[in-house]
Image: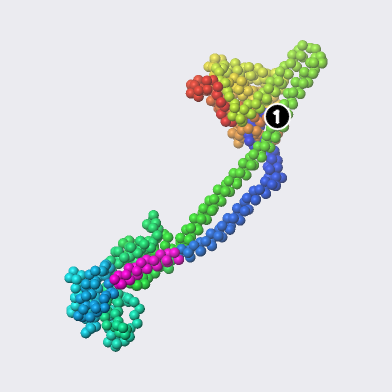
Amino acid sequence: MNDDHHTAAETKRTPSRRELATVERVIFGRNRLFWVGVLAVVVPLAVLLGLQYRWLTDLQHNSAVARRTTLENTLKAVANESRYFYSALADRALNLPPAAYTEETVQQAAHFLASRDLTGARRIFVITYQPIPRLFFYDAPSGTMLATEEPSPDSQAVWVAAAPWSTLHKTLGEIRLTGFSVEEHDASRRIIINAITDENDFLFAITGLIVDREHFVSSVLPDAVAQSLPSFDDAEALWVCAHDRFGRCVFPDRPCEPADSDRIARKFDFVFTDWTISLQGRLAVPEQWARFNFAFNVTLSAALAVVLMGGIVFTVRTATKEMKLSAMKNEFVSNVSHELRTPLASIRVFGELMRHGRVNDPAKVAEYGSHIEAESRRLSQLINNILDFSRIEAGQKIYAFEPTDVKQLLSGTIEAYRLRLKNQGFELDLQLPGEPLPLLSLDAGAMDRAIANLLDNAIKYSKNGGRITVRLHRTGPEVVLSISDEGIGIPPDEHERIFDRFHRVGTGLVHDVKGSGLGLSLVQHIVRAHGGRVRLESELAKGSTFFVHLPIDRDDNRKKEGHHGRRESPDC
């Protein structure tokens, strides 16, 4: 529909609801390949998501098991580091030379110990059984072995730890050595013992050391953790906590949760075997860590699926829109063909009548000539609309602005339509201001086409004639042109869309009215290029009024744009 007015506007939708339904049936009903293509994407995607969810479920279980193994190995490494430290300490401190195991030669042990690193041992002792059992403690400041005569907590703890060995010595029992042994009955004095036997496997001396608990907590355990635990930027992610036999947190100096069935925990296996080390932090519970990873992966997969589905929906909508646009363009070609044939047929008929001399009355000749001129103007307007639309679509439309008397321009356009208005039974009410209006910076040809399109729509959609009112006046910094009709009107929900290309209002009242569907779209484009705006007031069955607001002062704007009287058109 040309310059689709009112109920018959012009956008990217189909000309009517009935035609829209037809287009949709063609696109979605008959075009089975379209739906096959959509299903070919959606179904594999759904299957892939289902399989991925199942795979992630299995991965959650397997990763929890693998994670538990990894964390258990971490704690095992901490325990091994502790064992290695005390094994090395015992090996350095307790493997004394053979001559140091009798009462007479025990001082040689002091010379041996003075050259060794004894860090981690609070006290080192030797029990000799030759000639009688006696206890000697190593005194580092004096560098000698001191015999203990008076009982003390340390000496009592040592004798208690050595009691089983002393019993074997008294009974001359044969001893099978298995390396260092640990006595931890007294938690404050943990003792590592090395039993010395002769060539017949009979006990004849004992060496040992009392473990320095404070050194273990302040140095050995932190070093073991540092070497065994992976480093994290987040200190709360994973850390090691140690509890004593009473469940008190002894390492580190921060609150610790009790070791429970969900956390990875174990005992030390050499010294401090009644202490428990456990993993704390967000990553300490394998199942919780696996659930977090599962939720993260599922969320990521879902997000990617949503993005992919959004892309599919966008592609489908774009394809649908393009197919609808193709259908509307086909409708456009059909309507334009009709629009071209109508004036051409009239011109040919009147021209043939005049050529064959069938009209002799000068008044009739003038009347036929007026018809030919009017139809020629109508044909030129249609062609100009199509050419303008083509230039706008290609981004090549350029306007040439010149100072123009808008009153004179409007009068000339109206004059070209008077005969058509009269022949179709319209009464024209032209209201021009009495005072002169300032010259406006306009492209006169483009503005003439805009006014002509508005008049053409007013005629088309007022089928039974009536009054068409054209009013020009000044309002503040604007000149306002309004064109009113008494036609069929435009529904409120169509007021915005009628300025879109190819749009036709979804009502049967305009179904038989042909047009190119470009008129109002071009009107809006032209007015916007002049810095103005178009608005509409309309009611169904009562008619419509289009208002064109044009700014008076445009010289400064044009100078800033730097086009020197010429301006490229904005996007349509």
Query: What residue is disc 1 on?
Result: 336
Q: Main secondary structure of the magenta part?
A: helix
Task: Judge left or right: residue 221 versus residue 300.
Answer: left
Q: In the rendered image, which quarter contains the C terminus?
A: top right
Q: Is residue 88 rendered magenta in the image?
A: yes
Does any portion of residue 487 appear in the rendered image?
no
Question: Where does residue 310 sit, x and y in percent of width and height?
Answer: 57, 47
Q: Residue at x 48, y 65 (%)?
A: 65
Q: Is residue 555 rendered magenta in the image?
A: no
Does any portion of residue 340 appear in the rendered image?
yes
Magenta stretch, residue numbers: 69-92
Camera-nearest residue between 167 and 500: 167
Camera-nearest residue between 4 and 28: 28
Q: Residue at x 60, y 22 (%)?
A: 447
Camera-nearest residue between 500 and 101: 101
Q: In the rendered image, which quarter contains the N terminus?
A: top right
Q: Residues within 10 Å of mark 1 (few under 14, many from 20)?
A: many
Question: Where does residue 455 sit, x and y in percent of width and height?
Answer: 65, 24
- Relative to 125, residue 279 above or below: above
- Relative to 339, residue 31 above or below: below
Q: In the image, what residue type sits under mark 1?
A: Val
Task: Judge left or right: residue 108 versus residue 314.
Answer: left
